[in-house]
Amino acid sequence: MSLGDLKNTKICYPENETWFICWDNTRENVMAYGSILPTQCMETPWTEVDYYDNEAEWAEVLIENGIDPFPPEPIEE
Amino acid sequence: MRRALAKSLGAVEERFVISVKTDNAGGSADNQFTIPTSTTGITQAFNYDIETSDGQIITDVTGNTTITFPSAGTYDIFVSGSFPYMYFNNGGDKLKLLDIKNFGIYALGSTSQINAFRGCGNMDITATDIGHFENVTGFGNAWQNCLSLTSFPLLDTSSSTNFQSTWAGCSSLTSFPLIDTSSGAIFGNAWRGCSSLTSFPLLDFSSSTAFSVSGLGAWGFCSSLVTFPSNAFDASSATNYAGAFSSTNLTTQSIDDILVSLDTSGVSNGTFTQSGGQAPSATGIAAKDSLVAKGWTITYTA
C-alpha cells in the first residue's frame, strides 16, 4: 500500500494530553510517535494509529518496539 | 621553551585570556583553579605558558595544571603557546570560570570542541576576537548549559558537521549570531531550552540531516521564540523535526514560513512538532496538507 492509498488520520483538541503511535500498515514498524495537547492537532497519512491517555502505557509499547521515548540527555564523546 | 608572555602596548592580544573566581564550587581548593585539557581531536600538542594577574608565570605546561593563588578571589589567566582544547565536560572547576575575555591562540590545532565548556554555568564571553575554530568539525555539547551566557561571538564554525546539543540550556542567550553552519548535518537539541531567544537568524541548513535527537528538538522549549526566518529549511534533507518547535511562541507568520519551507524542501516521510504560540494560517495549513500527502506526521498548534 502506498501513501497515496492511505486516508489521513487527524485528531484535534483532545480533552487531555493524548499520546499516539503511528504504525505502518503491517503494524510491525513504528512510523511516528508523540503526544497531542488540547491546543494541538496531529495529522498523519498513516491509518494505523493507537492513542493512549496513559503515558506509561504508551512508553511501554514503544520500549517493546525498541524505542526509548525518555532517553537520557544525549552526551557526545 | 619560553615565549613572550607579556602583551606589549598596542599589540593585538594573541593570548587566550580567561577570568576565574577561585572560591566558586569546584574540584580544586578555594584558592586554586585547574585548567582542564583534552587531547582528543587535537593536531598539535599542548605546550603552553601561563601568566596570572597576580604575577605568577608558569612555563612549558603540556596538559592539565592547577594554579594556586595566594588567596581566594577573582583572577585573570593569560595562556600563550599551543592550547587547542579546554575540556570541562560538566565537571572540575566549571563554575569557577567567569569569562572568556580573549580567544587568541585558543583552538588552533583542534578539530573537536565536544563538551569543551559544557556546564560552565557562570561563564559569559566578552571576547571580541574569534580564535581559531576554523578546523573544528564537532561542537557537540560545547556550550551546553552555559546558563549565564548572554551572547555568542561570531566564531568560524564553517567546518563543523555536528552541532548536537551545542547551546542547549543556554537560557540567558538573548540573541544568536549569523554563524556559518553550511557544513552542519546534526542539529538535534542544539538550542533546546534557550528560553530567552526571541528571534533566530537565517542560518545555512543546506547540509542538515536532523533537527531532533531522541525526541529532543532543536528549538524545543525556546519559550520566548517568536520569530523564525522564512526559507530556513528550503535546502535541507532532514526528516526528523520531532519536538523541533515544541513549547515555543511562534507567530502565525513564522509557523507558516517554517511549514512552507519544509514543503519546499521536497523531503518525504518526516515528523514535525510545534506546540505553543500561534496556529498556522491557511498558507501554513496548505503546506501542512502537502507535507502530510508526502508522508509527514505533523503536530501543530491549532
Image (cartoon, rainbow, N blue to C red):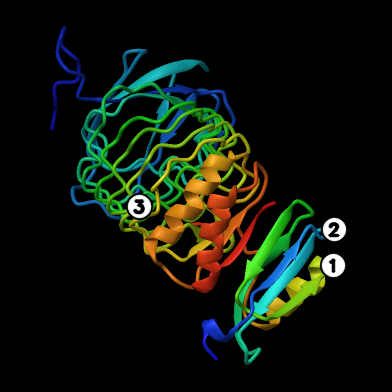
* Residue on which the image places disc 3: B205
In screen coordinates, is B217 left or right of B230?
A: right
Q: Are marks 3 and 1 in contact (CB under 8 Å)?
A: no
Q: Which of B123 and B54 is in front in this view?
A: B123
In screen coordinates, is A15 left or right of B216?
A: right
Which class describes the residues within 10 Å of circle 2: few (<14), some (14-19), or many (20+)?
A: few
Q: Position of residue B182 (x, y in %)?
A: 28, 50
For residue B18, the mark is: none
Q: Position of residue B70 (x, y in %)?
A: 45, 16
Secondary structure under tag 1 reads loop
Secondary structure under tag 2 reads loop
Q: Position of residue B135 (x, y in %)?
A: 21, 48
Q: For the residues marked 1 and 2, what is the alpha-carbon distance in whole angstroms?
A: 8 Å
Inspect the image, locate mark 3, and give the three-letter code of the amino acid beneath it.
Phe
Q: Do the residues labelled 2 and 3 touch (CB within 8 Å)?
A: no
Q: Please, which residue is most extreme toward the top here?
A: B9
* Residue on which the image places disc 2: A16
User: Residue at 14% across / 26% down in the picture?
Assistant: B3
Q: For the residues marked 3 and 1, what is the alpha-carbon distance in whole angstroms?
A: 36 Å
Is B156 rendered above or below residue B57? Answer: below
Inspect the image, locate mark 1, and give the three-letter code of the amino acid beneath it.
Asp
Secondary structure under tag 3 reads loop
Determine if residue B190 is in view: no
Mark sitting earlier along the chain (1/2): 2
Q: For the residues marked 2 and 3, what is the alpha-carbon distance in whole angstroms?
A: 35 Å
The answer to whether tags 3 and 1 share a subunit is no
Q: Are marks 1 and 2 in contact (CB under 8 Å)?
A: yes
* Residue on which the image places disc 1: A53
Inspect the image, locate mark 2, and give the three-letter code of the amino acid beneath it.
Asn
User: Residue at 84% across / 68% down in the picture?
Assistant: A54
